[in-house]
Amino acid sequence: MGKHLVRHGFMSDYTKRIYHGEADCGRDKVVRQRIEEYDNDAEKALEARNVCVALATDGFNLYGMVAAPYTCWPMFVIPLNLPPGVLLQRQNIFLSLIIPEHPGNNMSVYMEPLIDDLVHAWEERVWTYDRATRTNFKMHVWYQYSLHDLPAYGIFCGWCVHGKFPYPICKASLKFIWLTKGGKYSSFDKHRQFLPPDHPFRRDNKNFTKDVVVNDLAPQMMTLAAVRAQLDTPEVNNHEDGFVGYGEQHAWTQKSCLWNLPYFDDLLPHHIDAMHTEKNIAKAIFGTIMDIPDKKKDNVKARVDQARLCNRPKLDMVPPSADKSWRKPKADFVLTRAQGREVLEWFQTLMFHDGYAMNLKRGVNLATMRINRLKSQDYHIWLERLLPVMVRGYVPEHVWQVLVELSNFFRQLCAKELSWTVVAEMERIAPVLLCKLEKIFPPGFFNPMQHMILHLPYEARMGGPVQGLVFAEQEDPAYTWDHYVAAADVDDRDHRTFANKAERVKAELWDFYRCQEGFEARAASVTEQASKKLVKDMHYEAWVQAIIDFYDEFRKMKVTKEEARTMNLTKEEFMVVDTER
C-alpha cells in the first residue's frame, strides 16, 4: 500500500534528482536533523533516499451537499522529501486508503494495513529500484506527521474535540467555559495564563471576565511518553461506552494505531491545517463585522452571555420600553448598513491577477449585503491583504490596530520562508493578540478555531513553513487557456511528456472521446442525444433548486425536492435567486 506507492518516486526522471540531493529541499533537511538526534536512527537519516511521509484525510460527500448525508474519507500519503513547490502536486500525492463511511472511533481499524506497512518499511526496509543509478536498494520509510482540520484531527488521534476539552494539544489542562445562552463551549479568557507573570492583562478585572485576576501559569504540554503511559492503562467504563473519566478528566475515545510505530514517542505527530484555521477565523470576523445575520458571532445570545461574564454595560441588551422591543446596541467593530454597502461597492471595483483570487465582484450581492462563493484562498487574501484597508476609518483606532495585528500575524505565518527569530516572536505575541481580541469581541466569538492561534507558531517551528501544512480544501488556480499554453509539462506515470499543458489536455481529451474506426457516425448520434438530455436535466434541476433556495432564503421555509417539483416562482423571484447565486 503506502510503501509500494512511495517506491514509484524513484522511478521518475524528475523526482529521482530530488532524492539524490540535486534539488533544494528545505523541509527534508529539517526532518532529517530531527531523526539524527536519535543515535539508533542516525544511519537511516544519513541515507538521502530514505523517505519520510505525512498522512492526510478528510471527508466529503460524493453526491453533493443536497444529497444523502454520506461521507467518503480518502487517506493520502505525501512524501516530505520533495521541495515545497511540488510537495502537494497531484502526481506526488498517493491514495493509500478509501474509507467508505464516517470512520468515527473505527479509524484505527481502517488504518491497520497502512500502519503495518509503515512498521515494516521502518524496521525491515523495502526493496526499491533507483532510476538514477539503475540499481536496487533497501529503503526506509517513516511517518513524520498527519495533516487535518480540527474534526479530522480529533478522529485521527482519538480525542473528542466537541466538549469542554476541545483541543488535543492542551488536553484536559485547559477547560473551556460553557455559554448558557449560546449553548456551546468558549475559549474566552483562557489565554491570560499564557502571558508573562508580570503582564498587566493578568490583573485586568474589567475588560475580561469581571472581577477575575489570573495568577495561574500556562499549563505544561504533555510529552508523548506521558500520553502513552496514560493510554496504556485505560479503565473501560462497564456502564457506558468509552473510558472511565471521559468528559471530566479526559476526552480520549480510542487509542490510535499510530502508537504501534516504534518511534512515535519522538514526534510531533499531528498538525492542524493552517488554511482551514485561517478560513474559519476570517469567516467569523467577516460575518461579524458585516453584521450578516446567520454568520455573525455578535448576536443576541452572545450579548446575553457577555452581560453575564463581562463588565461592558454599554453593550448590554436594552430592555423594552412602552411598545418597543429589546434593542441590541451597536458595537464598535460592526459596520453600519451604509458602511457595509460602501465596502461591497469597493469590492466590486477590485481586480486581481489571474489565479490570485476569485473575481470578488461576481460574488457581491448588495441585496443581502454579503459576498457569495468565497473559498479558502479568498478568505486567505481577504484576511492578509484586504482587511486592514476595508475597515480603516469605519472602526475605532484601537479596534483597527488589533485587526491589523491579526492580519500581519497570519501574513508572517504563511510566508514562504520563516526565520527562527520571527517564529519565536510570534509565539510570544500570540497570547497577547488573543487577549486583545477578547477585549473587543464577545465570548461567543471564541471557539477552538480562535484558540488555535496560540499553537500555530509552535507547529510552524516544528514542521516548517505552513505551505507544507496546507492540504484540505486546496484550490486549483483559475487558469486560462493561455496559462496552459505557457505552462511546461512534466513527465507523467506513463512516461509521456508534451510540449506544454495545453497539448496534454488536447491529447487526453482525444484519448477519452476517440472511438473505434467505423463507428464515428453512431458515436456522434449517441453523443448528441446524451448531450441534449444532459442539458435538459441540468435546467430542470436548476429550476427545482432555485425554488428550494428561494423558500429557504427569503421565506425561511424548508421545501423538499418532491414539493419543489410541484411549485413555481415568478420571473422576479427567479431573478432574485439568480442574483443571490
Image: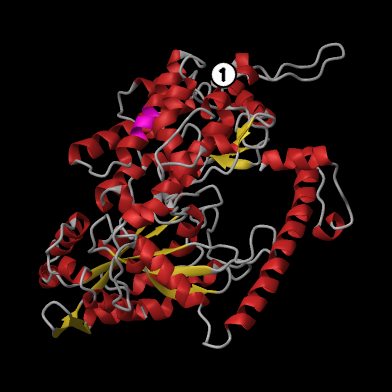
Residue at (44, 14) in percent of width and height: 397
Residue at (68, 39) in percent of width and height: 580
Q: Quadrant of residue 144?
A: bottom left
Q: Residue furthest right?
A: 566
Residue at (17, 64) in percent of width and height: 35
Please tell me whether residue 424 is drawn above or below residue 433 in the rendered image. Answer: below
542 to the left or right of 24: right
Instruction: Give the secondary structure at mark 1.
Output: loop
User: Relative to the observer, which residue lies in front, 494 or 524?
Assistant: 524
Q: Type of residue at label 1?
A: Asn
Please tell me whether residue 153 is drawn above or below residue 234 in the rendered image. Answer: above
In the rendered image, is residue 446 in sight? no
Main SS of the magenta part reads helix
For the N terminus, the quadrant is bottom left
Please tell me whether residue 353 is drawn above or below residue 201 in the rendered image. Answer: below
Place of residue 36 in the rendered image (x, y in percent of width and height, measured from the top left):
13, 63
In the rendered image, is residue 469 in sight? yes
Residue at (19, 83) in percent of width and height: 129
- Crowding near the residue tagged with mark 1, few <14, some 14–19, many ≥20 C-alpha atoms within 10 Å: some
Please tell me whether residue 301 is drawn above or below residue 44 in the rendered image. Answer: above
Place of residue 361 in the rendered image (x, y in percent of width and height, measured from the top left):
55, 34
The residue beneath circle 1 is 311
Q: Quadrant of residue 94?
A: bottom left
User: Relative to the observer, which residue lies in front, 200 or 102?
Assistant: 102
Whether residue 406 appears in magenta in the rendering, the answer is: yes
What is the magenta range?
A: 405-409
Place of residue 498 in the rendered image (x, y in percent of width and height, measured from the top left):
31, 68
Whether residue 114 appears in magenta in the rendering, the answer is: no
206 to the left or right of 273: right
Place of residue 113 in the rendered image (x, y in percent of width and height, measured from the top left):
41, 81
